[in-house]
Amino acid sequence: MRKIFVWMFFMMLMMSCNEETLPKPKGYLSLNYPEKDYKKITVERPYSFDAATNSEIKNLPKQWLKVEYPELKASVDITYRPVKDNLRELLVEAEKLVYEHAVKADQISAPIEYVNDEKKVYGSLYQILGNAASQIQFHATDSSKNFIKGSLFFYTKPNYDSVLPAVDYIKKDMIKMMETLEWKK
């Protein structure tokens, strides 16, 4: 009987010496987004900028716009306010709206400053990390007459890990909006 156990132990030892079994690697979501292409918005406003061709521009009251991304179930909401000796108030309000997301945010990045003296465009872009309602916001002004604010929203409950690829995709479009922003005289 003892010989049988020794023989079985020896056989099991020999059979277990094959290749090492490894767990399967994690799978990654593969998302395909359209190539970047831009066009100047055609809606009459005191400002203009280039928007992605795969977006739809919705005209709203008070010189506001909604740049919609139907495939991504997202939009960039653009609000406009004229500057009437209230620039400081508008800047404080814009920053306050960013930091209202601190409750749900893991982190709010330092603002990316944008300055174009030639076009008189001065602004900041904020990225909000975490399950906040808006992941990216920017504001821009000519510091004398015009002020706009843009906020990215998804039409779903925020789950930052899930929307991160779309956030990165739309962030490039929002940077392009700031870079091509022009004030109409």
Image (spheres, grey):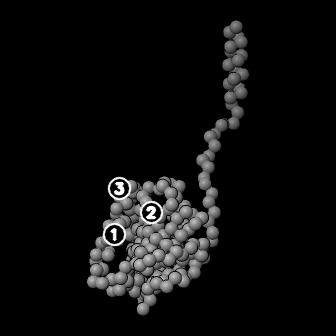
* Residue position for label 1: 95
Is residue 171 shown above or below 107? below
Q: Is residue 28 left or right of residue 176?
A: right
Q: Residue furthest bottom?
A: 185
Q: Which mark is residue 103?
A: 3
Res 92 → quadrant: bottom left
Is residue 89 shown above or below 21? below
Residue at point 68%, 9% (across, down): 2
Q: CA distance from mark 1 to mark 2?
A: 14 Å
Image quarter of the C terminus:
bottom left
Q: First in sequence: mark 1 or mark 2? A: 1
* Residue position for label 2: 135
Tag 3: Cα neighbours inside 10 Å, few (<14), some, or many (≥20)?
Answer: few
Residue at point 60%, 53% (across, down): 28
Labels 1 & 2 near each other (Cβ < 8 A): no
Q: Which mark is residue 166?
A: none
Could you tell me residue 94's position as x and y percent? 35, 71
- Is residue 143 in view? no
Looking at this view, is 157 or 101 the one in front?
157
Callout 3 amino acid: Val
Looking at this view, is 47 or 19 the one in front?
47
Tag 1: Cα neighbours inside 10 Å, few (<14), some, or many (≥20)?
Answer: some
Could you tell me residue 179's position as x and y percent? 48, 80
Could you tell me residue 60's position as x and y percent? 47, 75
| SS class, disc 1 | helix
